[in-house]
């Protein structure tokens, strides 16, 4: 079990994260927040790339900083900006990282073959990566994070650059892996984790806002999400009053999904809809959604 | 309760030993650690950028040999100035290879991926720097030997001691600055300072500098060399356990 205890991180006087308390058991955790909320800071502390100003992170009761290489031995990580050696082939690059991870050469060769098949780049295993597309590089990144069969897998924006088919494959891989390990996925693409995450962690103003299942989090805006059709000319005034979640054209009109917090304003023409995680996300981080 | 008759649970001493052994990490000496790392990671992976390193070594050696030929042909150059030249240039090769090594990692953006490996960038750098220092000693020795062939006034042992002292003194300070300051300007200032101060002392024909390089008894030179090697090894040990607060070097 991974336990985050009263964690705070300051850069000088700037507070990046404050009093974070979290508990992770085997399963998938979606870490969602807009850019700048402290997601990457938390991930960097979970991977020991930076250290907390206050508090600690414990794995099975031991501070991960004290565990040192023992912790890195059970950790897999895909950073947001995944760097690689351009003149290497995926096989060469993964062999290099396997050596740094202290994996035996024969075991590594077998594992790399398996992983390249898993992320479907086995056909370009011996091609130089400088010619690869963003999606292919991202798949090499996912493969390297799995090299040591990690007990804790942390992925920062793993679906960036992946096409819909690759996203689906990624979700299936992750669901399969989550049975016997902790998987933490940081993203701002809510749909990527909405249906696969056991729990969602939302960060707001550098603190934890929610850590709960998707359905429980969605309950927080139950009875507040509606859909209706309005005329394009009325849309400006409408959006001044309500938080718009999504809009699409329906013939001459506009179909709008929105938040109404005052029950007295509800109209009979509005249809109440079940909120989803994206609605919660937009509602909680709605600073610029209401038109002025 | 009778304090002379306290019930002690029956614990197998072998079990206790087993638990303690599992709980406590065995202390490994610096050299055993480097040897184990070398065996596990392998030469090919430690020097994955070997072709670039060889290129830097050859270019530096060629430049230094060229400078040595110019010095040899200049009749106004005194022996102590040759010692001074050796003192200034001995760490240059080491500096160039080490700098390239950090620059390359940063340029490729592989820092984060390599930092969370069992053997992270700092530990690998310690091993690489240790090997670089040996390569530098060998290359510097070739250069000194060349000086000796053309100018027999040079004391070979003194020249070697000066070269090794300079290399390890510079490397220790370089590592200290690298680990204790995050300001890039301090790092560049230290490197430029080494070259400028020594060159200024050499050109101004400073008497103390002259005496330090030529008159100091050889055993004092060797003592200084050993102290600098000790300092360097200590700095490398720190590098192995170093974790940057900011997350980058």
Image: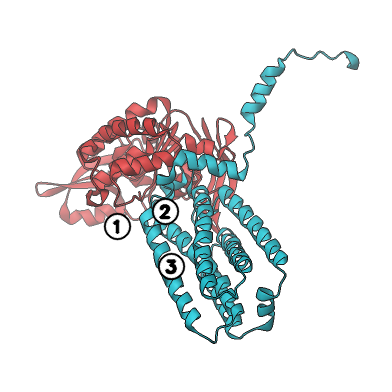
Chain colours: A red, B cyan
Above or below, A209 against A24 in this view is: below
Above or below, A16 against A208 in this view is: below
Q: How crowded is mark 3: few (under 14 residues within 10 Å), some or many (20 or more)?
A: some
* Identity of the residue drawn at 51% across and 53% down: B131
**Which chain hosts label 2?**
A
* Identity of the residue drawn at 21% across and 54% down: A235
**Towards the viewer: A194 or A278:** A194
Mark carried by residue B60: 3
Is residue A262 visible in this depiction of the protein? no
Which sits earlier in the primary sequence, circle 2 or circle 1? 2
Mark carried by residue A126: none
Q: Position of residue A36 (x, y in %)?
A: 42, 53
Q: Nearer the viewer, mark 1 or mark 3?
A: 3
**Which chain hosts label 3?**
B
Q: Do labels 3 and 2 share a chain?
A: no
Answer left or right for A223 relative to B19: left
Above or below, A56 against B186 in this view is: above
Q: Quadrant of residue B41?
A: top left
**Disc 2 on helix, strand or loop?**
loop
Above or below, B137 against A203 in this view is: below
Is there a contact, CB below 8 Å, between mark 1 and mark 3?
no
Answer left or right for A254 relative to B178: left
**Disc 1 on helix, strand or loop?**
loop
Mark carried by residue A36: 2
* Identity of the residue drawn at 38% across and 53% down: B49
Can you identify the residue that label 1 sits on? A291
**Towards the viewer: A154 or B133:** B133
C-alpha gap between disc 3 and disc 2: 45 Å
Q: Which of marks 2 and 1 is in front?
A: 2
């Amino acid at each position: 079990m991974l336990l985050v205890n009263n964690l705070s991180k300051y850069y000088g006087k700037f507070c990046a994260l404050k009093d974070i308390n979290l508990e992770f058991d085997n399963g998938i955790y979606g870490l969602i927040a807009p850019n700048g909320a402290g997601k990457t800071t938390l991930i960097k502390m979970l991977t020991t790339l930076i250290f907390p100003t206050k508090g600690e992170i414990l794995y099975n009761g031991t501070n991960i900083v004290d565990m040192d290489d023992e912790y890195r031995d059970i950790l897999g990580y895909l950073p947001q900006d995944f760097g690689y050696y351009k003149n290497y082939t995926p096989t060469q690059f993964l062999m290099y990282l396997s050596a740094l991870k202290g994996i035996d050469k024969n075991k590594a060769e077998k594992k790399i073959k398996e992983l390249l098949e898993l992320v479907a780049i086995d056909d370009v295993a011996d091609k130089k990566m400088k010619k690869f597309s963003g999606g292919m590089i991202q798949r090499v990144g996912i493969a390297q994070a799995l090299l040591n069969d990690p007990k804790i897998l942390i992925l920062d924006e793993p679906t960036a650059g992946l096409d819909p088919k690759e996203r689906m494959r990624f979700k299936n891989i992750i669901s399969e892996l989550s049975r016997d390990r902790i998987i933490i996925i940081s993203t701002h693409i809510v749909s990527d984790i909405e249906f696969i995450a056991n729990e969602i962690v939302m960060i707001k103003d550098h603190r934890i806002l929610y850590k709960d299942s998707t359905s429980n989090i969605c309950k927080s805006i139950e009875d507040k999400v509606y859909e209706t059709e309005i005329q394009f000319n009325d849309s400006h005034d409408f959006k001044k009053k309500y938080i718009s979640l999504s809009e699409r054209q329906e013939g001459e009109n506009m179909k709008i999904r929105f938040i109404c917090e005052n029950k007295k304003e509800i109209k009979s023409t509005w249809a109440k809809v079940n909120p989803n995680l994206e609605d919660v996300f937009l509602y909680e981080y709605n600073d610029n959604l209401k038109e002025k | 309760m009778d304090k002379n008759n306290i019930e002690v649970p029956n614990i197998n001493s072998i079990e206790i030993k087993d638990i303690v052994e599992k709980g406590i990490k065995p202390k490994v000496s610096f050299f055993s650690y480097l040897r184990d790392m070398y065996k596990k990671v392998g030469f090919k992976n430690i020097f994955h950028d070997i072709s670039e390193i060889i290129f830097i070594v050859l270019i530096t050696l060629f430049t230094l040999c060229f400078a040595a030929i110019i010095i040899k042909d200049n009749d106004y150059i005194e022996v102590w100035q040759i010692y001074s030249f050796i003192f200034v240039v001995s760490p240059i090769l080491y500096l160039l290879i080490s700098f390239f090594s950090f620059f390359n990692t940063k340029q490729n953006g592989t820092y984060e991926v390599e930092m969370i490996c069992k053997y992270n960038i700092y530990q690998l750098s310690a091993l690489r720097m240790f090997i670089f220092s040996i390569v530098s000693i060998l290359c510097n020795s070739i250069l000194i030997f060349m000086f000796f062939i053309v100018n027999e006034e040079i004391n070979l042992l003194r020249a070697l001691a000066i070269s090794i002292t300079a290399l390890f003194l510079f490397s220790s300070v370089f590592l200290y600055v690298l680990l204790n300051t995050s300001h890039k300007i301090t790092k560049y200032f230290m490197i430029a300072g080494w070259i400028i101060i020594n060159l200024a002392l050499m050109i101004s024909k400073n008497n103390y500098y002259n005496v330090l390089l030529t008159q100091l008894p050889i055993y004092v030179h060797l003592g200084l060399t050993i102290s600098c090697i000790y300092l360097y090894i200590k700095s490398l040990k720190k590098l192995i356990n170093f974790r940057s607060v900011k997350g980058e070097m």
